[in-house]
Image (tube, rainbow, N blue to C red):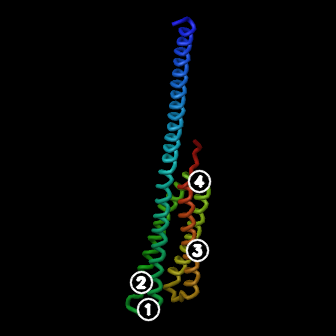
C-alpha cells in the first residue's frame, strides 16, 4: 500500500466519521424539535381543557336552572288555563292555589338562576354572556305575564288577552334559551389558546 492509498483511506475514515456525526447530530436535532412540538401540543391541549371544563360546567348549570324556571312558569300557566276553562268547578280554588304555588316556586328559582348567570359571566366569552343576558331578560317577561295573570285570576279576569302575551313571551324566551345553547356550544368548540 502506498502513501496515497493510506491518505485516501484516512480521508475516507475522517469523511465517514464526519458524515456519521452530522447524521447523528441532525437526527438528534430533529428528535429535539419533534419533542418540543409534541410538548407544545400537549401544553395547548391541557390549556384548552383547563378553559373548557369550567366553562362547560357553568354553561350546563345555567341551562339547567334556566330550564327549571321556564318549566315552572309553563306548568303554572297550565293550572291557570285549567282554572279559566272551569270557573264553576269545585277545583277552581285548588287550581288557583296551585298556580300561586308555582308563582312562589318561580320566585324562589330566581336566585339560583342569577348565581348560574354570574358564573357564566365570569367564565365568558362575551358572546355567551350576552346570550345569557338575552335569555334571562326574555324569561323575565314570561314571569311578568304569569305574575299578572295569577294576581288577577281571583278577580275573575279572563286570561284571553294575557294568553296571547304569555304565549308570545314564552316563545321569545325559548328562542333566547336556544341562542344561549348555540353560543355556548360554539364557544366550547373554539380553540382560544395559541400553540
* Upstream in sequence: badge 3 or badge 2: 2
Secondary element under disc 4, as helix, strand or loop, is loop
93 w.r.t. 145: above or below: below
Question: Which is more N-terminal, label 2 or label 1?
Answer: 1
> How many C-alpha atoms fall within 10 Å of the one at disc 1: few (<14), some, or many (≥20)?
few
Q: Secondary structure at mark 1?
A: loop
Q: Is residue 101 above or below residue 11?
A: below
Spatial CA distance of label 4 from label 1 is: 49 Å
State which mark lies toward you, 3 or 2.
Answer: 3
Is residue 148 or residue 136 the one in the foreground? 136
The picture places residue 72, in percent across and down from the top left corner, at: 45, 73
Q: Please give left or right for residue 116 compared with residue 93 in the image.
A: right
Near-viewer residue (124 or 16): 16
- Circles 4 and 1: CB distance less than 8 Å? no
Q: How far separated are the C-alphas under marks 1 and 3?
A: 28 Å
Discs 4/2, front:
4
Q: Is residue 98 left or right of residue 5?
A: left
Where is mark 4, residue-wise?
125
Mark 3 burial class by Cα count in 10 Å: few <14, some 14-19, many 20+: some
Callout 2: SS: helix
Q: Earlier in the sequence, mark 4 or mark 1?
A: 1
Q: In 3D space, how far apart are the residues under numbered discs 3 and 2 (Cα atoms)?
A: 26 Å
Q: Where residue 95 is drawn, which disc sits there?
A: 2
Q: Mark 1 and 2 residues: CB-CB less than 8 Å, in contact?
A: yes
Mark 3 touches mark 2? (CB < 8 Å): no
Q: In the image as oriented, which residue stretches furthest toward the left?
A: 90
For mark 1, what is the residue? 86
Quarter of the view holding residue 90: bottom left
Q: Residue visible at 60% across and 65% down? A: 134
Amino acid at each position: 500500500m502506498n502513501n496515497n492509498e493510506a491518505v485516501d483511506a484516512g480521508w475516507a475514515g475522517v469523511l465517514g466519521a464526519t458524515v456519521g456525526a452530522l447524521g447523528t447530530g441532525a437526527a438528534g436535532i430533529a428528535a429535539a424539535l419533534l419533542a418540543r412540538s409534541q410538548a407544545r401540543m400537549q401544553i395547548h391541549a391541557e390549556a384548552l381543557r383547563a378553559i373548557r371544563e369550567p366553562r362547560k360546567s357553568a354553561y350546563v348549570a345555567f341551562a339547567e336552572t334556566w330550564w327549571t324556571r321556564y318549566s315552572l312558569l309553563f306548568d303554572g300557566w297550565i293550572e291557570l288555563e285549567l282554572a279559566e276553562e272551569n270557573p264553576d268547578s269545585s277545583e277552581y280554588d285548588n287550581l288557583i292555589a296551585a298556580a300561586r304555588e308555582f308563582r312562589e316556586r318561580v320566585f324562589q328559582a330566581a336566585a339560583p338562576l342569577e348565581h348560574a348567570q354570574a358564573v357564566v359571566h365570569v367564565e365568558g366569552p362575551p358572546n355567551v354572556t350576552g346570550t345569557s343576558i338575552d335569555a334571562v331578560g326574555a324569561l323575565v317577561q314570561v314571569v311578568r305575564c304569569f305574575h299578572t295573570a295569577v294576581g288577577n285570576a281571583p278577580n275573575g279576569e279572563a286570561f284571553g288577552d294575557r294568553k296571547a302575551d304569555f304565549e308570545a313571551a314564552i316563545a321569545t324566551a325559548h328562542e333566547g334559551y336556544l341562542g344561549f345553547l348555540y353560543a355556548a356550544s360554539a364557544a366550547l368548540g373554539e380553540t382560544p389558546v395559541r400553540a
